[in-house]
Image: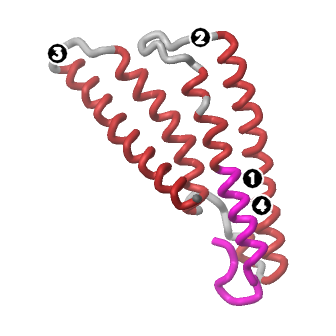
Amino acid sequence: MIKKCNRIEEGFLIATLVLMVALIFGQVIGRYIFQNAPSWTEEAARYIHIFQVWIGAGYAVKLREHIKVSAFIDLFHGMTRKVLDMVALIIWFLMVLLVAIFGTELVMTTLQYGQVAPATQIPFWLPYLAVPLGALSMMIRLILQMIEIIKKDYDKPGEAAS
């Protein structure tokens, strides 16, 4: 199930990147060659980019590609390192949980007002939906990493979380 979700996520990120590049390319061609570009392409590319950032953030957690400073934590080994890795993930999880809660509140509030984007007429709640979806994706990945930390033997060399 998780592998299938990963494939869907990868496909989404690739497809939206291609779409965003095509929209921006069309905008540039329209603006500089035809002196007239549709305004909806810029707005659509912006909303696609918002989804890419938030969904990509969850994918980056899976790949362990988020920025972290490990100079301090690399000084420790064994159970101390395991506890520090777990505490770091718990703090990160709590922060992302808050983002998910407030992001959901933002989506619900925007949904109530029924506001739409000027050029595309897309309801504003739709681009904002990327925030709780991305946060949920990150939370799932962080829980999986916590499970890995619990299972790992940090007393063996090279077993510390990376």
Q: Which residues are magenta?
A: 138-162
Q: What kind of element bears circle 4?
A: helix
Report how far apart the C-alphas of labels 3 and 4 lie in the structure.
53 Å
Mark 2 Cα shell of 10 Å, populated few (<14), some (14-19), many (≥20) = few
Report how far apart the C-alphas of labels 1 and 2 lie in the structure.
32 Å
In the image, is residue 159 part of the stretch drawn in magenta?
yes
Give, as a three-letter code, the residue at label 3. Phe
Residue 79 coordinates in the image, percent (x, y): 83, 80
The dot on residue 92 is: 1
Q: How many dots with numbers?
A: 4
Residue 104 sits in quarter: top right
In the image, is residue 37 part of the stretch drawn in magenta?
no
Residue 1 coordinates in the image, percent (x, y): 58, 58
Question: Residue at the bottom extreme?
Answer: 156
Report which residue position mark 3 lands on.
Answer: 34
Residue 159 coordinates in the image, percent (x, y): 67, 82
Give, as a three-letter code, the residue at label 2. Gln
Report which residue position mark 4 lands on.
Answer: 88
Q: Is residue 2 left or right of residue 136?
A: left
Give, as a three-letter code, the residue at label 1. Trp
Q: Is residue 128 left or right of residue 147?
A: left
Residue sitting at 42 percent across and 21 percent down? 43
Residue sitting at 63 percent across and 71 percent down? 162
Eyeballing the image, is 135 above or below 46?
A: below
Residue 74 sits in quarter: bottom right
Of the residues under marks 1 and 2, which one precedes in the sequence? Answer: 1
Colour basis = secondary structure
Of the residues under marks 3 and 4, which one precedes in the sequence? Answer: 3
Report which residue position mark 2 lands on.
Answer: 115
Q: What kind of element bears circle 3?
A: loop
